[in-house]
Image: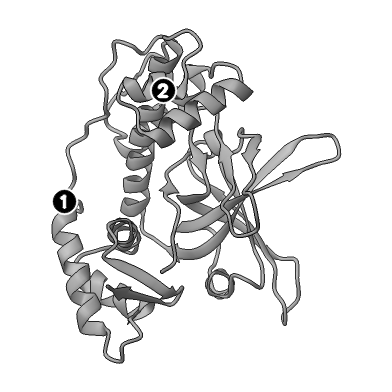
Amino acid sequence: MNARETAWRLFSSELNTATYEIKGADEKSPSYIVTHLGAMVNRVLIAGVLTEKENVGSGEEPMWRGRVQDVSSGNFYINIGKYQPEAAAAIANMDTPAYVAIIGKVRTYTANDERVFVSVRPERIIKIDEETRKQWMLETAQSTWSRLKMMKKATSLENATEKDLIGLGFCERDAKGIVTALDHYDVPNSATYLKTIQYALRTILPDNNIDLGLPEDVSDLPDEIEIEPGDTAHNSADMEDTILRLLEELDVDGKGAPRDELERRAEAEGISSMELEEISNILMDKGLVYEPNLRYLKRI
């Protein structure tokens, strides 16, 4: 079974400013980039507008570089090489601009002047519609808000340790990430992240005058961002049942369900490609499905 890391929802403003990396002990161990808000990131689920793409390799051995704009003027930078054949084939057939969602691993590059550049190496890249992009923006705003609140709670303690934070109800991963971030960065400026959240919410709800006020002290603000789900929102449990049923129906030769056929059948059931990716991750986390390879998903 292939173990997969959590695919974090991050805006580019948080990912691109991360400079500290925890290297794996060996080639098979995962490495993590630690953000200023304490996210320990190995994989990401990002979405936005593919504004540029360029094949800097050859026709026989393509190597794609691209830029994906998320909110405001923020950009993710992507690199796709020969070891990501599915993503390379997909981006080759895409025109720009296009709404896309990407699952991929993060990479860093340190220049001679010690500046650190962060990029994403896509495992999969798919076209999405505007509503799906807004759904990602909402989920990412909620995820960023949650990390911001946890960081504020942690910094309210003097020299908080992982044990202190776990005692306050943090999970081990979040406690380690926040303590590591505070050890290597200054206390983050809340306004930087609130501006991004505010811009995202204004994009999702253009008729609402959303003003977070950009306070430094967010201790009195609600714990979560709550927005009534739209018509496209689905019940997660129902979608999990649907995907499990489709996996059984499509596994006709014991190899698993072909990803492309699973996407077509799921879409016919009202489940978007991005929702399918999310549900697949949930089911893998629950130990109910696994990936024999990137082209198949199989029920256990």
Q: Is residue 43 left or right of 186 when viewed as pictured?
A: left
Sequence-earlier tag: 1 or 2 = 2
Helix, strand or loop status at disc 2: helix
- Quadrant position of residue 79: bottom right
Helix, strand or loop status at disc 1: loop
Residue 73 can be seen, yes or no: no
x, y (%) of residue 35? 55, 33
CA distance for labels 1 and 2: 42 Å
Rendered-image quadrant of the N terminus? bottom left
Question: Quick check: 212 above or below 117?
Answer: above
Q: In the drawing, what numbered circle is on residue 163?
A: 2
> How many neighbours does mark 2 have within 10 angstroms: few (below 14), some (14-19), or many (20 or more)?
few
Q: Is residue 193 left or right of 273 when viewed as pictured?
A: right
Amino acid carrying label 2: it is Lys
Q: Which of the pair 142/75 is nearer the observer? A: 142
Q: Which residue is mark 1?
A: 231
Q: Is residue 121 left or right of 3 when viewed as pictured?
A: right
Question: Which residue is pictured at 52% across the width and 64% down the height?
Answer: 123
Question: Quick check: 118 above or below 214?
Answer: below
Number of the front mark, 1 or 2: 2
* Coloration of the structure image: one colour
Amino acid carrying label 1: it is Asp
Number of marks in picture: 2
Q: Which of the pair 229/179 is nearer the observer? A: 179
x, y (%) of residue 165? 39, 21
x, y (%) of residue 46? 46, 50
Question: Which residue is pictured at 72% across the width and 77% down the height?
Answer: 61
